[in-house]
Amino acid sequence: MTDPIADYLTRLRNAIKANHRIVEVPASNMKKELTKVLKDKGFIKNFKFDEDGVQGKIRIALKYNPETKESAIVSLERVSKPGLRKYAKSDALPRVLNGLGVAILSTSKGVITDKEARQHNVGGEVLCYVY
């Protein structure tokens, strides 16, 4: 596995397509921070860090609409890849679906959304788009 963040997003995408309620992914600090941002923005119900073994696991409870059974996450798109990193300056931060979606960035202030990066006036590596 050369890109753990892409693997994380693919596991979430596959679990949503299969209508799973819970998905387990191997833990890392970056994945923990991504999961916290997804929870704060209301894309997932809850999460739990299991510190068993060397690496540990993250259990993520996915969020679905109770009536239509549609997922809260419509699309997860990896932007910056190991072969081609994408960075954005503070004055040129991306907008996802004209502000309806969220761009998650890795900045000097930590892993934050594009809106928080505008408030802090920082740029960074654009990890993924979520809507």
Image (cartoon, rainbow, N blue to C red):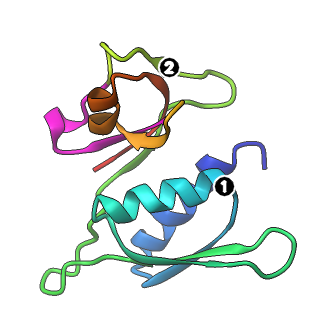
Q: Which residue is mark 2?
A: 87
First along the sequence among labels 2 and 1? 1
Q: Residue at x 54, y 30 (%)?
A: 108
Between 12 and 115, the residue placed more toward the observer is 115
Mark 2 belongs to which amino acid? Tyr
Between 33 and 6, the residue placed more toward the observer is 33
Q: Residue at x 27, y 50 (%)?
A: 131
Residue 95 placed where, x, y %?
24, 30
Question: CA gap, disc 2 to disc 1?
Answer: 20 Å
Is residue 23 highlighted in magenta? no
Q: Which residues are magenta?
A: 94-106
Image quadrant where residue 17 sits: bottom left
Residue 43 placed where, x, y %?
31, 64
Q: Indicate whether 120 appears above or below 25.
A: above
- Side of 53 where 102 appears, left or right: left
Q: Which residue is mark 1?
A: 29
Q: Local crowd at mark 1 within 10 Å, few (<14), some, or many (≥20)?
A: few
Q: Local crowd at mark 2 within 10 Å, few (<14), some, or many (≥20)?
A: some
Residue 14 placed where, x, y %?
50, 66
Image quadrant where residue 37 sits: bottom left
Q: Residue at x 25, y 35 (%)?
A: 96
